[in-house]
Amino acid sequence: MNNYETTVKRWSESAENFNKSIQSQLFDENSVTVWTNLIKENALQKEAITVLDIGTGPGFFAIILAKIGYQVTGIDCTPEMIESAVKNAEQQGVKPELKIMDSHVLDFEDNTFDLIVNRNVTWTLYEPEKAYKEWKRVLKPGGKLLIFDANWYMSHFDPLAGREMTEGMREYREKYGELPEKFSMNVVEDYWLKLPMVGVQRPQWDKAALWKLGFQNLVFDTNLSERVSLTDMDRMLYGCTPMFMISATKATKAEEEEAFNRVYWDGAAINWGSNCLRDHHSFKKNAYLELLEPHFEEEKKYKILDIGTGSGFMATLLAEKGYQLTGVDFSEKMLGEAAYCAQELGVQVEFVQAKADHLPFDDNSFDGIICRNVTWLMKDPQEAFSEWNRVLKKNGKLIYIDGNWNLYQYDEEEKQRFIKNREELEALGEKKLYGYGHSSTVLIDKLSANLPFSKLRRPAWDQENLSQFGFNVLEIEENISQKVLTEIEQKREATTPMFMVVAQKK
């Protein structure tokens, strides 16, 4: 008997008693009101809502949500449960669509539902990650996932929960004489011994699983007891495992990409901070100043914007020369490192969290813009360069340094040059080699896949296109690597020389 068949058998055996419990809730006005309001408060606020009730059982959620006008589909793997749900819906005067279906394999198109709800379902999943991925698939972008569950059977793994359960059972027995026939949380069952979620502390597990899947706006209410524990049985027998709620939103593709980028660069921040301080005390400080200073008159107090400042290396070295610097980055942790580095170096820089292509500054605000290893990250170069032009004063300078960092992934000739370079360096005993196919670069490779500059040869592109964004190209230096990189860095980046572009706003 496979996992699906085991699940169907277990809940078929429980269907009759479970239906009696759900029927009592359906005729309990207080219970209906509490659960209806709880879902409405956390659902999308729109007129027509399509809902999928996963593991509907005898149909409680499907019925109460259909009553308030939602378009509801309820699914369950157990035929007996669906039969009960159909009868209960008829008695309640509503007609949600009710289907037999495995919650791990949904027979719906992508982006079908505005809302997915379930209660006491996740703990029964035999492949929870697979199920969550499937639930995400059928949610519309912007749609909500609401999970209501508890750490069922945790009393067998947590001594405190075990003591609380024993006290609750004794209190119930003293008041009512016998424990309810359906109550079995104190008994070990072969069924739940095989379930991966039993004994796992939640909702911590869910937080990690949903985050990895790209869900956003994760909200956790870890104790709904005061609101949903409406009977003595709820309070005494289930009080040791309070019900929790998880609310999560399916992001749009663009939102997912942005969140991924933010997490990636946040993770790199501490290393970049170390690099900033190290480079300030190396030849690189003067090397970069020799590249930049000829384009700014030292006696003038230029107002300069460092876009994609990262840990603030470029901003801090120009601030040391007396220029008025503002650094922007979309990564909060990068800005934290930048502020730390500026403080350590004793310089004043204003740091602002912002996207490089949506700057929170007035037109004609800056005398100059600098950036290093940023332009390759632009999803829309036209939008970015036009925005930079907007905030520059007339005749203001734009100076950026970059490289064709990912061209080898999309150009066969560059790929072969890259591989040959890596082979030569390995033969010399070099260990710090990352790149094509390396496990450590999977995320950055994923990040680069949708970026236009990953597949374009530069700075030839820049020479040809900057004019249409309002710039005159003053100077392009196609290879500055020998000036700003150490000897070993030059060898590692031999197939990807760094270039510098100097342009002026028309």
Image (cartoon, rainbow, N blue to C red):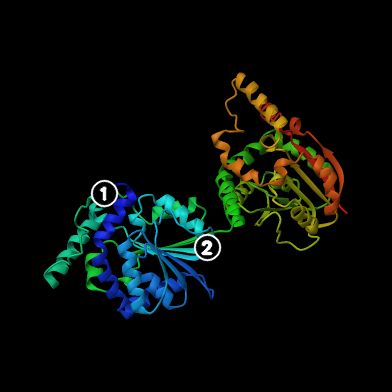
User: What residue is disc 1 on?
Assistant: 193
Residue at 27%, 55% in the rendered image: 9
Q: Residues within 10 Å of mark 1 (few under 14, many from 20)?
A: few
Q: Is residue 424 left or right of residue 363?
A: left
User: What residue is disc 2 on?
Assistant: 112
Hey, which quadrant is residue 406 in on the image?
A: top right
On-image quarter of the C terminus: bottom right
Q: Position of residue 105 (x, y in %)?
A: 43, 53
Q: Is residue 225 left or right of residue 399?
A: left
Residue 32 vertical position relative to residue 323 in the rendered view, above or below? below
Residue closer to the observer: 129 or 260: 129
Q: Secondary structure at mark 2?
A: loop
Hey, which quadrant is residue 182 in on the image?
A: bottom left
Q: Is residue 78 visible?
A: yes
Q: Looking at the image, tell me whether mark 2 or mark 1 is earlier in sequence order.
A: 2
Q: Residues within 10 Å of mark 2 (few under 14, many from 20)?
A: some
Residue closer to the observer: 371 or 47: 47
Residue at 65%, 43% in the rendered image: 448
Return the mark for residue 235. none
For badge 1, the amino acid type reads: Leu
Residue closer to the observer: 386 or 292: 386
For badge 2, the amino acid type reads: Thr
Q: Check whether the beta carbons of the residues at disc 2 and disc 1 lie within 8 A of each other.
A: no
Q: Position of residue 286 (x, y in %)?
A: 74, 36
Residue at 57%, 46% in the rendered image: 264
Residue 261 vertical position relative to residue 280 in the rendered view, above or below? below
